[in-house]
Image (spheres, helix red, strand yellow):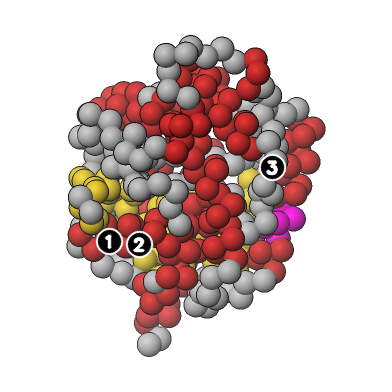
Amino acid sequence: MSTSLNPDDITHTKSETEPKELLEQDGYANVQDDVPPLGKLYDVGGGRRLMLHHAGTGTPAVVIEAGAGAFGLDYLNMFELCAKRTTCVLYDRAGSGWSDSGPGERSAREIVTDLHNALGKALIEGPYLLVGHSLGGLLVRAFAQNFPDDVVGLVLIDPATESFPAPQEDNEAVVLAMLKELRRNPDIAREWYPTMFAEWEKLPERVRDPLIARHLDPDRAIIGLRDMQNARRIQEEVANGPVPPNMPVIVLTGMQIDPMPGGSDEDKHAFNQIKLAAHTAFVNSVPQSEHRVLKDAGHFSYTQRPDVVVTAVFDILDQFTTRSRHC
């Protein structure tokens, strides 16, 4: 679904680095204040560090993979609920949140290898139950493809799939337009994503203030836009990857219309119907999968209905416990 932003309508001073150049730079996202409010920075090789935060005890560990443009701490509400039962992990991909940036456009394999290395450095052993939101849904599937012996189940929250969302010819123009506007007026993000900013306001002050400031930093916003550009490569990589092991998979599809930039409510309703069809087709192609459609939540169901998301996680934990007892 296209956004209402028009690149030709956005003012831009000559003294700024051009957005297209920023999207192609390496190392631009190493913001000076690199101390996360929660978690630690773990070396994953090449002098790069990823922020990873964990709490709770038990196995399998629940590992949360964020969506495009999101940070690990955005999922703190469901993280805390899951950590009451077992080990739970959230982290920032390279260049997002408090993690160091990675070298150029990255493959799904490189992204999930970073996560695997960070889990090892944090001494969090498998097996893992992976929870992926949006683009993170593709990435946790890529993790299962690359590390099949370490994964016991997947919960996919409004996930991207191999065919959804479909690439748009004007995607780069849209991305560059959004970046220009963010650099000119970072606070515009509050208007674009009111659901998320309302959720962050509920967090403890020591987490809330640095998290919001980080999201309003245009240099960090570049990473989210770069994720959007890189989505097609990740879709193709997962589509052409090996068949992951047979394991429980729960897909959560949010059908509520979200207050987000671009498009009419009619457009968004049509978009949701395409999403529902894509998710249904995916579930029908995967053994041991289950489809749960949420009429009272949208793309950010982990904030709107965290109870439903955590129930899905616990259902797979219960299945793992039952299988373990019979082994």
Q: Residue 84: x and y, percent?
A: 31, 53
Taking the image as drawn, is residue 171 in sight?
yes
Helix, strand or loop at label 3? It is: loop
Helix, strand or loop at label 1? It is: helix
**Real-space Cα separation, disc 3 to disc 1, in angstroms:** 34 Å
Q: Which quarter of the rendering shows the C terminus? A: bottom left
Q: Identify residue for label 3.
A: 168
Camera-nearest residue between 93 and 206: 93
Taking the image as drawn, is residue 196 in sight?
no
Helix, strand or loop at label 2? It is: helix
Q: Residue 304: x and y, percent?
A: 54, 38
Q: Residue 205: x and y, percent?
A: 28, 25
Q: Estimate how packed mark 3 is, as few (under 14), some (14 to 19) or many (20 or more) residues with alpha carbons within 10 Å.
A: few
Residue drawn where x is 79% and y is 32% of the image: 266
Q: Is residue 192 left or right of residue 85?
A: right
Camera-nearest residue between 323 and 95: 95
Q: Identify residue for label 1.
A: 117
Q: Which residues are magenta?
A: 276-280
Residue drawn where x is 36% and y is 66% of the image: 128
Q: Identify residue for label 2.
A: 113
In the figure, 207 relative to 290: above or below?
above
Comparing labels 3 and 1, the label whose residue is closer to the camera: 3
